[in-house]
Image: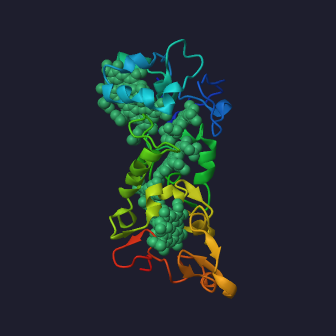
Amino acid sequence: MARLGKRGRGLPAAVAGLAVALALAAACSSFDRSAFEPPRIEGAAFVGDQACQDCHPRITRAFPQSAHARLHPPGAGGRDHACESCHGPAEAHVASGGAGPDRHIVNPGRDPQACYQCHLEVSAEFHLPRHHPVTEEKMTCAACHDPHGLDIAKPAGGAMMARRNETCAGCHREQTRPFVFEHAAMREGCVSCHSPHGSINAKLLTVRDSNLCLRCHAQVPGPGAAGGFYIGRVDHSGLLRYGTCWTAGCHAAIHGSNTQPYYFY
Ligand code: HEC
Ligand code: HEC
Ligand code: HEC
Ligand code: HEC
Ligand code: HEC
Ligand code: HEC
Ligand code: HEC
């Protein structure tokens, strides 16, 4: 029996030249099938998702809604084997009832490599100059996503937005507490201004300058012959040269304020 590390990366045999393709119901742009190799567990065969039901009911109940329910390592046989594409062939695990020091199964746990091998674009984002410290293993993908679909973030869609902000709230109290004057942009989700994985811009901003705000707040020509331009009801002609909307000494409390309706402080 090969020694099992807690992390897939620690598995010596995990990547030994296994030729793998994936049968998937849907294609994914950020997903490179040829790079994917499920963890290998010496001597163990694939047993299929059905086998997990009795002992892990909470996970298997939610799982069909997960995008990951469609994963299928070829060579695994005819039945559904999505669980085993991340956890490795589970024969020995099931036979032992989950007993033993390593439980004969792989728990990718804190290792983002287990996810990067399929999500190459996400890997690239976490290698940008500013990023959440996932590659450094100070936090995990599971801090924001549940790989089993219990609460996985959807890339688009209204109702998911509030929940997505909740994910951030666990660690960022200051930006997510209730404000007397709440910036309505927050309802569109943190991701309307921040790239959650990583960015080339400070503070993980999607855009580094005032165009971040002008996307939603149109600049309009001032009235009459005076010219200039207005944002909202205020003449901003001379203002933007002092910096960005939030660094020029104006909208510094951009997430919301308890005292100032224009989020100055
Ligand atoms: C006979 C019961 C049983 C079956 C069947 C079973 N497991 Fe487990 N499994 C356990 C027990 C017991 C544990 C340890 C306690 C826990 O984490 O729930 C465990 C733990 C795990 C862990 C965490 C291991 C760790 O070291 O952190 C994974 C991953 C896992 N099981 C995957 C699976 C998968 C995938 C299947 C189906 C192919 C499966 N199990 C089927 C009993 C079972
Ligand atoms: C996309 C990869 C992926 C798939 C597919 C997947 N898991 Fe997991 N699983 C993980 C990761 C990552 C963790 C560790 C999560 C953490 O540390 O919070 C984990 C943890 C676990 C655990 C131990 C922790 C816990 O929450 O109890 C069990 C048991 C488990 N998985 C069972 C399953 C079963 C059963 C399936 C299929 C129904 C499955 N997994 C499918 C990635 C996956
Ligand atoms: C075997 C390949 C594979 C692995 C390993 C894998 N994923 Fe995925 N993941 C996919 C595929 C395929 C999709 C579906 C893409 C689609 O439908 O557009 C997906 C979708 C997702 C989504 C988007 C969910 C949604 O509802 O749109 C998230 C988030 C995600 N994966 C996170 C993870 C995390 C975190 C891990 C590591 C624990 C991981 N993935 C490991 C293949 C994988
Ligand atoms: C700080 C929270 C956070 C962490 C950590 C995080 N994500 Fe995400 N992820 C998000 C949010 C929020 C979205 C939705 C983005 C959007 O709608 O623009 C997302 C979207 C995704 C998507 C679907 C859209 C896309 O970009 O392809 C995938 C796949 C994904 N994440 C994978 C991962 C993987 C893999 C990891 C770990 C290596 C990870 N995420 C870590 C917050 C996070
Ligand atoms: C309207 C755009 C916008 C939205 C929406 C937004 N932010 Fe920000 N955020 C900014 C700007 C601009 C900065 C840089 C100015 C600053 O430090 O306050 C920033 C800075 C931050 C910082 C760094 C603060 C520091 O002191 O370094 C965190 C953390 C943060 N935002 C979290 C969030 C979270 C969590 C959400 C969602 C609940 C969110 N933001 C929504 C624009 C936004
Ligand atoms: C598990 C805790 C955790 C969660 C959840 C989390 N963050 Fe963070 N966030 C951090 C840590 C830690 C840092 C500091 C990173 C550093 O300095 O390297 C950070 C930094 C940031 C920054 C500022 C980066 C800078 O350059 O100062 C922004 C913006 C941010 N997070 C937004 C978000 C958003 C949006 C979400 C939800 C999608 C989120 N975070 C979820 C822990 C978390
Ligand atoms: C996703 C869209 C969006 C983004 C991006 C956005 N805002 Fe807003 N903002 C709104 C909405 C919606 C309102 C409230 C409705 C309105 O305009 O009357 C609002 C209100 C405001 C107000 C209060 C003005 C008033 O008349 O009530 C200020 C000030 C403001 N935003 C500044 C900014 C700044 C500065 C940025 C860039 C850091 C920014 N906004 C980015 C959508 C956005």
Q: Residue at x 54, y 53 (%)?
A: 197
Horizontal side of 186 relative to 13 (left or right) equals left
Above/below status of 263 relative to 21: below
Q: Residue at x 60, y 78 (%)?
A: 230
Q: Specify the quarter for ligand 1.
A: top left
* Residue 159 occupies quadrant: top left
Above/below status of 40 relative to 211: above
Q: Of 213 and 139, which appears nearest the observer? A: 213
* Residue 59 occupies quadrant: top left
Horizontal side of 27 relative to 84 (left or right) equals right
Does residue 237 appear anywhere in the picture?
A: yes
Horizontal side of 173 relative to 157 (left or right) equals left
* Residue 93 occupies quadrant: top left
Q: Of 80 and 2, which appears nearest the observer? A: 80
Instruction: Please state the horizontal and vertical placement of residue 174, each as a whole percent of the image.
Output: 37, 67
Does residue 41 appear anywhere in the picture?
A: no
Above/below status of 103 relative to 44: below
Above/below status of 91 relative to 33: above
- Look at the image and tell me in which quarter the C terminus lies: bottom left
